[in-house]
Image (spheres, rainbow, N blue to C red):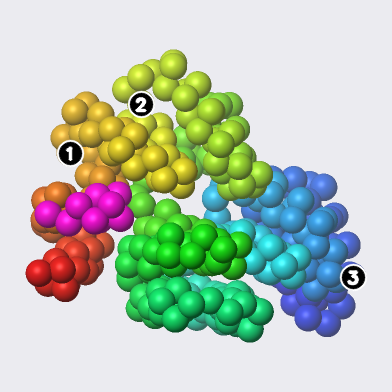
Amino acid sequence: MDEAFELINNDVELALDIFNDLLGLEPENIELLNGKASALIRLEKFDEAEETINKSLLIDENPTALLNKGVVLKYKKEYQSALKFFNRAVQLNPDLNSIVFIFKKEIIDLIDDSIFTYNSFSENVNEFIKMGIYYRECMNYCDAFDCFNRAITEDPSCNASVMPLVEEVKTLLFNEFMFHTPDFESENVSDLRIEFIRALLIEENPQDALAIIDLILKRDAEDLNALNFKGCILFLFEKYSQSIDCFDKCLEIDEEYFYALFNKGMVLRIMNKLDEALICFDALLNESGYGDKAEKYKIETLEKIKIID
């Protein structure tokens, strides 16, 4: 295996042959699948690379496969999807942040430049867009989301140009949500859950993912992880009240299911229900694994309240 990885930079065709031979013996070896995908990317065989990456992701949602998927989608000019996979890769492995930053900056620059180069909007709309971009760069995704949507409300004709920014920030916000990702190697994962992961991560079809989650909940209406996932997906459709209902139901079942409490705070913040969001974040400050993110959003929410006051 080590030989194959060393050959990627010198003889990529030979490296690919070795990966294929080894995968004949170990077809579900994630490291081999990711190595094969890297070789295929070098050869610009992007469709084959994506197929290999998808196999890896079905075995386990691993950061290397997510990064490779982002690279493939970048080359295919599917920029919004690429950003989603880059963000998720960093979420699972922060050590990838430096390399992902380079890829993301290139994509974001392309998106941002196109808005002002090919369009002429009013001064107010341009100001909303510029402020949204500023907030996004400051990682204040809630206010960025609000600014981009306000630009569209101000001038609906800018929808086609600004919507990619809305979708990008929506993805960034979705990646901030907290949820349990099943470990395919150590957990007994049902076929429905595998289909859910396929729909959400590989087919990038949240509508199908939502339908599958509803099937899971028909079997067990108190499945906390499924309810929490449903709340997160409903956010993608901007069904905020229904999203909060899911998180509330989680907390009725288990008041210490902190994933749902944090996610509820996020949706309330997005809705600009600032005082209610603060209650959620405050309750998490002393909880291990949640305190740092809760502190970040508490501070950001307090700053927003000061601006409004």
Which residue is at 83% across, 82% downward?
10
Query: Quadrant location of the N terminus?
Result: bottom right
Q: Nearer the viewer, residue 57 or 302?
A: 302
Q: Is residue 88 left or right of residue 2?
A: left
Amino acid type of disc 1?
Glu
Which residue is at 41% across, 45% downward?
238
Disc 2 marks which residue? 223
Secondary structure of residue under mark 1? loop
Name the main secondary structure of what is drawn in magenta. Answer: helix
Q: Nearer the viewer, residue 213 or 258?
A: 213
Disc 3 marks which residue? 13
Residue 299 in sight here:
no
Amino acid type of disc 2?
Asp
- Residue 273 among magenta residues: yes
Disc 1 marks which residue? 256
Secondary structure of residue under mark 2? loop
Residue span colored magenta: 266-275
Mark 2 or mark 3, which is nearer to you? 2
Does label 1 or label 2 sit earlier along the sequence? 2
